[in-house]
Amino acid sequence: MDIINYVKENGLKLGFVTSTTTNNINAVFFVLKNFIQKDDFDFIGNHNLIDKPKPNAEIYYKALNALSLDSSECIAIEDTEESVKSSLDAKIKCIGFPGNFHLHDSFVKCEMKIIKLDLSIFK
């Protein structure tokens, strides 16, 4: 979880912007409790906070407002091209990090596409 440590050590802000349910968010934090905590994030938001879910950019605008940030100060990491669209529509650059169901999607509008995760961190 080097990126989270970097963010915390350098006084940066970290948001968790998702379209999943609150139960799934809680499950993610439960499974990864030895690596990340909700306290690591300055903003956690999902479809419950907005009227128009991804691929609409509304959740990103909500996060930008809550974090008092301009889109040019941010980068998003998204796992589907549909979600990439939401970040780009909010004028936030994006890194594609596809899950297994989206490995072969192009993510051409992203700054880069990362397709391999070093799972040794979970040992």
Image (tube, rainbow, N blue to C red):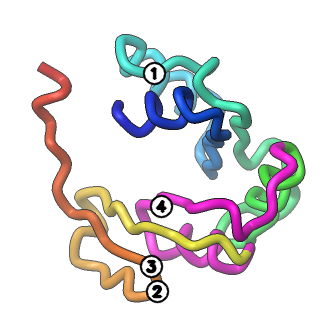
**The disc labelled 1 sits on which kind of residue?**
Ile
Does residue 70 belong to the magenta stretch?
yes
Q: Which of marks 1 and 2 is nearer the N terminus?
A: 1
User: Do tag 1 and tag 2 residues touch (Cβ < 8 Å)?
Assistant: no
Which badge, 2 or 4, comes first in the chain's sequence?
A: 4
Assess whether mark 2 and mark 3 are in contact (beta carbons under 8 angstroms): yes
Query: Would you name the residue on which mark 2 appears?
Result: 109
Disc 4 on helix, strand or loop? strand
Q: Please give the label number shown on residue 110.
A: 3
The residue located at (61%, 49%) in the rendering is 18
Q: Nearer the viewer, residue 49 or 32?
A: 32
The residue nearer to you, when weighing 56 against 73, is 73
Spatial separation of the CA atoms under disc 1 and disc 3 = 25 Å
Residue 113 at x, y percent in the picture: 31, 71
- Residue 36's tag is 1
Task: Please provide percent x and percent y for residue 37.
Answer: 53, 18
Q: Which residue is drawn at 52% across and 27% down?
A: 9
Looking at the image, tell me whether mark 4 or mark 3 is earlier in sequence order.
4
Q: Badge 1: how crowded within 10 Å, few (<14), some, or many (20+)?
A: some
Farthest residue toward the front?
A: 10
The answer to whether the residue labelled 4 contacts the one labelled 3, judged by CB atoms less than 8 Å apart, is yes
Label 2 sits on what residue type?
A: Lys
User: Which span of residues is magenta-colored?
Assistant: 67-90
